[in-house]
C-alpha cells in the first residue's frame, strides 16, 4: 500500500528524532505514542469525510503524535512545555506546540469547523489541525487537498494562514516518494535540532525546544552601548 522508499524515509525520520530526543530531551520522548493501525486511520478519514495525505498516514502508522490533554490540570501543566515541535517565549507570551494524536486531530478539527462554519471562512476546505500549543493559541493546519502545511496567524478568524513549506517541494502525486507539507516540515525541524540551529532552553525549572534560531543567517547579534543584542526569527518556515 505504501511505497517502500517512503516507508524507509518515514522510519528513518522517527528513528532519528527519537534518538535525538533520547540524548537531549528524554522528557519529551516519553510523551510519544505508539503508531496507529490502518483501521484507525480509515476510521479517522470516515469521521473527517476526506482522505489524509499518504505521507501523513505513514507518519501516524509509526507514531501517533504525543499524549493528548489530560483531565488533570497539574498533569497538563507538567507536560505543557514538552511539545516536540517546540515554541518560543518573549515577555509573557509563551508558545509550545505539540504534535497531536490522531483522535485529537479528528476531535479538534470537527470543533474548529463548528466554530467557524457560520463565518464561511473555512468552508469547503479539507483542513485538519495537526499540532497545537497548550499555552497561548498557535495552530498548524494540514490541507489535505493540496498537501500544504499552514500555521495560523493572529488573524486566523479571518482565514489568514502562512504556508510553512515552499509549494515547489510538495509532491502529492509522486508514486515512489510522495511528500506533503507535514513530512517536509518535520524533517527540516529535525535537521535544525541536529545541527544546533535550534536548541533546548530553560524556562524557570522546565526545559523546552526553543524555535528562536541560534546561528546565522537566521540569527544576528550586535553590541549597542555595551549591551549585546541578538535578533532571531521566531518560527520555522522552510
Image (tube, helix red, strand yellow):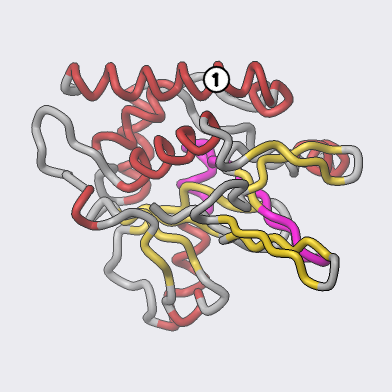
Residue at the image point whose x is 82% and y is 66% from the top? 91
Image coordinates for residue 128, horizontal then vertical, percent:
40, 53
Residue at the image point whose x is 63% and y is 32% from the top? 67
Image coordinates for residue 186, horizontal then vertical, percent:
43, 39
Residue 34 vs 85, above or below: the answer is above
Residue at the image point whose x is 52% and y is 29% from the top? 194
Whether 103 is among the magenta residues is yes
Disc 1 crowd rating (10 Å Cα; few below 14, some 14-19, many 20+) is some
Whether 19 is among the magenta residues is no
Image coordinates for residue 133, horizontal then vertical, percent:
64, 53
Res. 71 image quadrant: top right
Seen from this angle, which residue lies furthest right? 205
Given residues 129 and 229, the one toward you in this image is: 229
What secondary structure is found at the residue carrying circle 1?
Answer: helix
Given residues 209 and 154, the one toward you in this image is: 209
Q: Is residue 83 left or right of residue 34?
A: right
Image coordinates for residue 216, horizontal then vertical, percent:
53, 51
Q: Provide the residue span drawn in magenta.
A: 88-108
Residue at the image point whose x is 54% and y is 43% from the top? 104
Image label count: 1
Residue 121 vs 139, above or below: the answer is below
Q: Quadrant of the N terminus?
A: top left
- State the residue position of label 1: 18
Q: Is residue 121 left or right of residue 213?
A: left
Amino acid at each position: 500500500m505504501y511505497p517502500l522508499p517512503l516507508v524507509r524515509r518515514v522510519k528513518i525520520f522517527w528513528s532519528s528524532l527519537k534518538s535525538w530526543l533520547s540524548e537531549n530531551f528524554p522528557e519529551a520522548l516519553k510523551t510519544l505514542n505508539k503508531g496507529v493501525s490502518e483501521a484507525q486511520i480509515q476510521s479517522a478519514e470516515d469521521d473527517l469525510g476526506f482522505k489524509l495525505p499518504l505521507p501523513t498516514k505513514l507518519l501516524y502508522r509509526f507514531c501517533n503524535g504525543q499524549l493528548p490533554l489530560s483531565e488533570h490540570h497539574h498533569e497538563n501543566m507538567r507536560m505543557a512545555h514538552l511539545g516536540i515541535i517546540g515554541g518560543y517565549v518573549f515577555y509573557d507570551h509563551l508558545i509550545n506546540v505539540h504534535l497531536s494524536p490522531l483522535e485529537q486531530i479528528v476531535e479538534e478539527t470537527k470543533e474548529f469547523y463548528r466554530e467557524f462554519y457560520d463565518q464561511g471562512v473555512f468552508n469547503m476546505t479539507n483542513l485538519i489541525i495537526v499540532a497545537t500549543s497548550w499555552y497561548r493559541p498557535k495552530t498548524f493546519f494540514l490541507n489535505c487537498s493540496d498537501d500544504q502545511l499552514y500555521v495560523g496567524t493572529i488573524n486566523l478568524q479571518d482565514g489568514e494562514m502562512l504556508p510553512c513549506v515552499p509549494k515547489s517541494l510538495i509532491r502529492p502525486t509522486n508514486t515512489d516518494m510522495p511528500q506533503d507539507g507535514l513530512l517536509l516540515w518535520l524533517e527540516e525541524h529535525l535537521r535544525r535540532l541536529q545541527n544546533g540551529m535550534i536548541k533546548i532552553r530553560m524556562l524557570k525549572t522546565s526545559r523546552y525546544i526553543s524555535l528562536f534560531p541560534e546561528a546565522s543567517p537566521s540569527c544576528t547579534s550586535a553590541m549597542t552601548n555595551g549591551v549585546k543584542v541578538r535578533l532571531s526569527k521566531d518560527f520555522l518556515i522552510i
